[in-house]
């Protein structure tokens, strides 16, 4: 996806994957800085750790408490910080600037893939972990009317619920299943990655027929057991490939300063994921 976007923008760059142990994350970021990398993407479990490791946090990273994109910057002749792409020579002083592109990608995918207007919506979200926490906070910031947050570990759901109550007091937050209909069921758990996984919700406590739409953050397999059940129940459905696309496209825009070639990136992503 990223290399297709880079090629489309005619940049002499290359996007590569590196496996880094969490204990080595700080030195990996410093090493990339020393080698004049344009930027980095971070995935689980690095997103939370990096908050305390980058030199400066964008407002998006401060708001959501996680960093999934880093842009390296240097000082120009006037002493102002600029992205490394803007500098003709590698500067002696470089800083790491942390961003979060995940949160906006969630809501963009919900709007574009399912046509959901989140303002005033009732949402049941399954999972309150790293990705779940960001999703719940973002949904609350979009002024959903009610958010039902269920997590296998009640303590984690309670912690996210308390954070939402403090930051978005107008949103009604519950750590239980709803008794009536919801506009959206959002799966932010890992249940569904394996074919023999259980459903991420309790069939005794919630009937899928009460959800207008179902979004599963999992994108491989394309049709999880949850999405198959949701389709059978007559729900509109979408998987997480849109979220993956939009967070990556925003990262590319942060690095390049140019609009991302969305269609090119989508084609490359779908070809890679689904063959």
Image: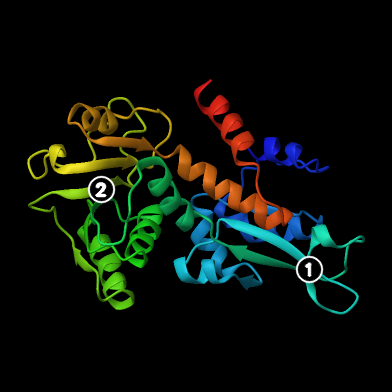
Q: Locate residue 249, reporting x and y percent.
A: 60, 47
Give the residue number, with chain letter if any, for mark 2.
184
Q: Are marks 2 and 1 in contact (CB under 8 Å)?
A: no
Looking at the image, is mark 2 or mark 1 nearer the viewer?
2
Check the image and report above or below for 91 versus 268: below
Q: Can I make out residue 201 in this image?
A: no
On screen, 207 above or below 256?
Answer: above
Give the percent coordinates (x, y) of residue 123.
Answer: 24, 54
Mark closer to the chain start, 2 or 1: 1
Q: Marks 2 and 1, how far apart in space?
A: 41 Å
Tell me if residue 89 comes above or below residue 232 in the rendering.
Answer: below
**For numbered disc 2, what is the local secondary structure?**
strand
Residue underneath mark 1:
82
Q: Is 152 left, or right, of 187 in this rendering?
A: left
Quadrant assignment, res 171: bottom left
Q: Position of residue 4 (x, y in %)?
A: 69, 35
What residue is drawn where x is 20% and y is 31%? 234
Residue found 57% across the figure and 62% down from its top: 50
> Can you give x and y, in whole percent of width and height, for residue 71 in the image?
69, 60
Residue 158: image quadrant is bottom left
Neighbourhood count class around disc 1 (C-alpha, 10 Å): few under 14, some 14–19, many 20 upward = some
Q: How many marks?
A: 2
Q: Nearer the viewer, residue 149 or 78?
A: 78
Question: In the rendered image, is residue 69 in sight?
Answer: yes
> Is 130 in front, or is 2?
2
Residue 57 location, quadrant: bottom right
Q: Secondary structure beneath disc 1? A: strand
**Quadrant containing the N terminus in the rendered view:** top right
Which scheme is used to colour this image of the protein? rainbow
Nearest the viewer among 242 and 84 is 242
């Amino acid at each position: 996806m990223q290399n297709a976007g880079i090629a489309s923008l005619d940049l002499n760059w290359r996007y590569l994957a590196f496996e880094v142990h969490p204990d080595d994350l700080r030195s990996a970021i410093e090493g990339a800085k020393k080698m004049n990398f344009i930027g980095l993407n971070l995935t689980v479990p690095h997103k939370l750790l990096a908050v305390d490791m980058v030199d400066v946090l964008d407002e998006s990273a401060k708001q959501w408490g996680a960093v999934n994109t880093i842009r390296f910057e240097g000082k120009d002749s006037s002493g102002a910080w600029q992205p490394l792409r803007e500098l003709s020579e590698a500067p002696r002083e470089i800083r790491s600037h942390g961003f979060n592109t995940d949160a906006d990608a969630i809501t963009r995918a919900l709007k574009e893939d399912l046509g959901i207007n989140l303002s005033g919506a009732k949402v049941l979200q399954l999972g309150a972990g790293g990705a779940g926490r960001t999703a719940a906070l973002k949904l609350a910031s979009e002024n959903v009317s009610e958010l039902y947050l269920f997590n296998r570990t009640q303590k984690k759901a309670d912690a996210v619920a308390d954070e939402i109550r403090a930051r978005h007091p107008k949103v009604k937050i519950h750590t239980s299943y709803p008794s009536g209909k919801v506009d959206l069921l959002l799966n932010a758990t890992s249940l569904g990655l394996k074919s023999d996984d259980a459903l991420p919700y309790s069939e005794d406590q919630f009937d899928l027929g009460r959800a207008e739409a179902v979004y599963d953050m999992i994108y491989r397999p394309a049709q999880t057991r949850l999405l198959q059940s949701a389709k059978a129940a007559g729900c509109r459905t979408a998987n997480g490939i849109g979220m993956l696309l939009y967070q990556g496209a925003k990262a590319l825009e942060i690095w390049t300063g140019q609009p991302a070639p969305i269609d090119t990136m989508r084609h490359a992503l779908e070809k890679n994921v689904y063959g």
